[in-house]
Structure formats: structure tokens, C-alpha cells
Image (cartoon, coloured by chain):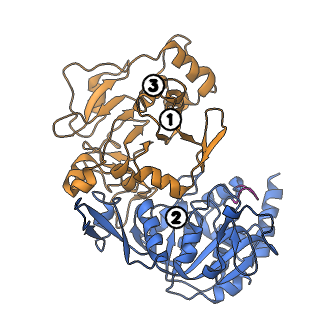
Amino acid sequence: MNATTTTRAEYCAIACADAWRDNGEVLASPMGLIPSIGARLAKRTFSPDLLLTDGEALIVGLDGSVEGWLPYRQHLAMVTGGRRHVMMGASQLDRFGNQNISCIGDWQRPDRQLLGVRGAPVNTLNNPVSYWVPKHSKRVFVARVDMISGVGYDSAAAAGPSATRFHRIPRVVSDLGVFDFATPDRTMRLACVHPGVSVAEVRAATGFPLAVPDEVPRTREPTATELRLIRTVIDPEGLREREVPAA
Amino acid sequence: MTPEDVVSRLRSGMTLGIGGWGSRRKPMALVRALLRSDITDLTVVSYGGPDVGLLAAAGRIRTLVAAFATLDSIPLEPHFRAARQRGAFELREIDEAMFMWGLQAAAHRLPFLPVRAGLGSDVMRVNPALRTVTSPYDDGETFVAMPALRMDAALVHLHRADRLGNGQYLGPDPYFDDLFCEAADSAYVSCERIVDDFASAVPQTLLVKRHSVTGVVEAPHGAHFTSCAPDYGRDEPFQKLYATTPWPDFAERFLSGDEKTYQSAVQSWHEEQQ
């Protein structure tokens, strides 16, 4: 790791952290390493009011001190009460933001059974859900997911007002860039690319037509403080570079 | 009771709830006793972990009601996966919150409870029997009518219990063990230790009440290899062995005898690793 140059993994962490900007006093639920770095960075800097858990049933401060109890049934109430922003993984994700973590292939008899839908249906209908994809590819960014676990914009609209009422997918972060659904038909749009990534590269790794603005901005640079926090406080062992190797 | 006594009250074809969550505080001693019996054709209701994996590998599940199966530190449950990929059982795949409201409905003797979760997802496609319900109030919203998950029997593992069936948890999360007991016609609690009373207990730790419990089994290390914090953590090396050993080999070495034989086989295995 070069001391002066921001790595791809660090841009990813910054892009994840920004998902929780201006979220207020909500539970940040990062799934995966880079989102965890992002959530802790956000709490240490611009979103100090975020709540974090220890991964089980305790709400903890940045130093690990306990500030609350959150067993699963209360966690679910936080979800349905909307006081949470989760960043989930995705085995498949389509252009409307439908996500699959259940199985690959025909659900009746899958080629590859994965986790199951878990809480993706309740999450997506009740609290903001962002996604993190560490390796952007056509295997993940697909035309159609095999089992809709997390609900996308088209599926929510088809299911009616009760489904759309609290449905929101603020952003998708991958190792190539950041995506949102700020288009008239709520299809996925390239919001920015990480420095060193071309738009053509993103398109080539995406299995559906991506909305791309004329001018695609680059992911913002971390501040000196943010970079120092990532490197010396939050992830001093550099585990992030293993999840997203240097390009 | 002994684990064998519990299993003697169970029958093939029953709907069986299993407490805990993932690879956390699962009633594994009771599941192992079940594996030693001929009971099969089960409908298993579980926040799935290795309980599901073991029963699936042994071919005892006809229908699984679950939102997931995981070993936590190993995200994908290998025997659950393999069984699904060979079409070994029918899956009723629902969301975690739908599952909880199904337990609540059963515990409260309601036919269903309304939940927002599920709408727009393929949970509705793969469970064509699920119905929706419209609010009778001004909002007029439509929800999934999650049917009660009523069970013939429930198995849970707690830290302490008394002989009457009052159960205490000492770990970070009660999971849904009290609801499992209340949602089942009969419920069996295994515990690390049977105590005479709860004189010094923090009242909130007394999770399961005796009116909802049919029998109590003292089963030290009865959640092994899942976590039973603070009494003991997950046996990660052994879980890894479970996840990476072909099923017949694992079953022969660890599951061919009674619970005592299992615990000593585990101990010998750990000694071999040193």
C-alpha cells in the first residue's frame, strides 16, 4: 500500500461510509468487511449518532462499550420501525435493484443453494437497504435474479402501495463504482466510478443496460483524517486490501 | 427426562419446532437423540443451523419451514445445501420476520398476523398458499397474512431449568425459544444444568415458563457444537470438521452411539488435534 495514493479498497470504504451520511440516529447494519469499515468511519466522522452492534445482541460504541441490548426480536422491530439502514451483500442484483441471496437456478431444485432469503424481504420493505458487491461481474449484475429476496423498485411497484411505502435503495457500491436508482423508471444508474475505472469497464462487467449520465463523476477523495482513521484506527491490519485487491 | 424419553414422545410425520438461531444454542443433544431413532417424515420449523443440516443429511425432513440455514462462521450450511440441490425435501421459504409473526400467531391462537414483509418478493411466488389481507381501517393497506406456525412439538436448549420446566437463558439473546414453546402442543427443554430454584436469578432471564413445557432434560454440553455463551462458545474446529467431512464418515464416527459416546468422541478428536 502506497502511503500517499488512495487504494481501490479505500475508495470503496469511503463510498460505503457515505451511504450513512445524514442518516441521523439509526442502526447502521453493515454486512461484510468493507461496509463495516465504512459504517465505523461514518460514525467516527460525519455521522456520530449512528448505532452499531457487536454482530450479536449488543449495541456498542466505537470502543466496544455496551450502550444497549438488541436481541433479534427487537432488531426486527427496529427494521419495521424504519430506524435502520442496512448494507447487504448480493449474489445477484438486477437493474431494478431486485436482490438474490437465496439460491442460484430453479428454486424448486437449485443448482446452488445459498443462504435463503433471510431478512431481505422485511428489510427492503421497511428500512433503507443498500448493497455491497466486492467483485463486480455479469454473474452478480444480471438481467433477472433467480429468487427475489430483496425487493427491487419494479417488484415493489407491482406489489402496490404497502410495498412501496417505505421501500428505498439508496445506493449500490461495488469495487468499480457507486450506483443509484435516480432515473425516471427507477433503473440502476452509474452514479460515479472509482478513480482508475472506466465507464466501458463498468458496462462490460454489467449484465444489463446501465443508465449512464453524459458526465460520470469520480468517487470522492477521502480527507486526510478519513484516510488516517481507515489505515491506523479502523483497519490497521489492512484486511480491506484482501477483500478488494489493488487494481 | 432423558433425550430418549423425549424422542419416545415424538412420531414420524410430526411438525417439529427447533429453537436457537443459526449455529447458536441449538438443542443438539435432542436432535442427536432424534437421529438415533427411526422418526422421519418431519416438518421442521427452524431458524436453521446444523440442526437442519443433520436432519437433512439423515433424510428425516419432508418439509422445512425456514428463512435460512447457516453455521454463522461458515455462512452456508453444507448438508442443507446438498439436500436442497438433490431435491431431498420440500422447502417453505419465508422471511425471518414472517417466521416470527407465524410463531406469534400460533402462540396467541390466531390464524394469522399481518406483516408487510414478503410483498413484492419471490417468497409469494414459491409459497402460493400465502394470502394477503387488507386493513379494515382508513389506511386500506394490504399485508401478507402470515399463517400461524403451530407445531406438534418444540425442542429448545437453555442454560438452566428447574424440574417443573421453568427455563433460564444466560446468553445475549433469547432468540425465539419462549415463542417456540408457546406455539407447540408439547415442548421439551434441554438445559446445561437442572437447578433447585432461581433464588438469585435476574427475573428477566427466566424466559420459558413451566405451563408451556412438557419435559426437561439435563444435557450438559447439549448445544455442542453450537454456541451456548456464556457457558461455552461455539466449537469452531469441530464445526469445521462437521462442515468438511463426508456425511457417512461423520455419522459413523460421532453419531453411532449415545450422547455420552458422542461427547467422548468429540473429546478424543480434540485430543488428537493437539
- Give the SS element for disc 2: loop
Q: Nearer the viewer, mark 1 or mark 2?
A: 1
Amino acid marked by disc 1: Leu
Residue on which the image places disc 1: A50
Residue drawn where x is 61% and y is 36% of the image: A61
Mark 1 lies on a secondary structure that is: loop
Q: Which residue is mark 2?
A: B47
The three-letter amino acid code for the residue at tag 2 is Tyr
Instruction: Specify start and end residues of the magenta stretch as a single range.
Output: B228-233
Which chain is home to disc 2? B
Q: Chain A: what color? A: orange
What's the colour of chain B in the image? blue
Asked whether, in this view, residue B207 is left or right of residue A176, the answer is right
What is the distance, in whole Å, between disc 3 and disc 2 at their CAs?
Answer: 34 Å
- Residue A96, how many percent across, how many down? 25, 44
In the figure, residue B156 lies in which quadrant? bottom right
Residue topped by disc 3: A14
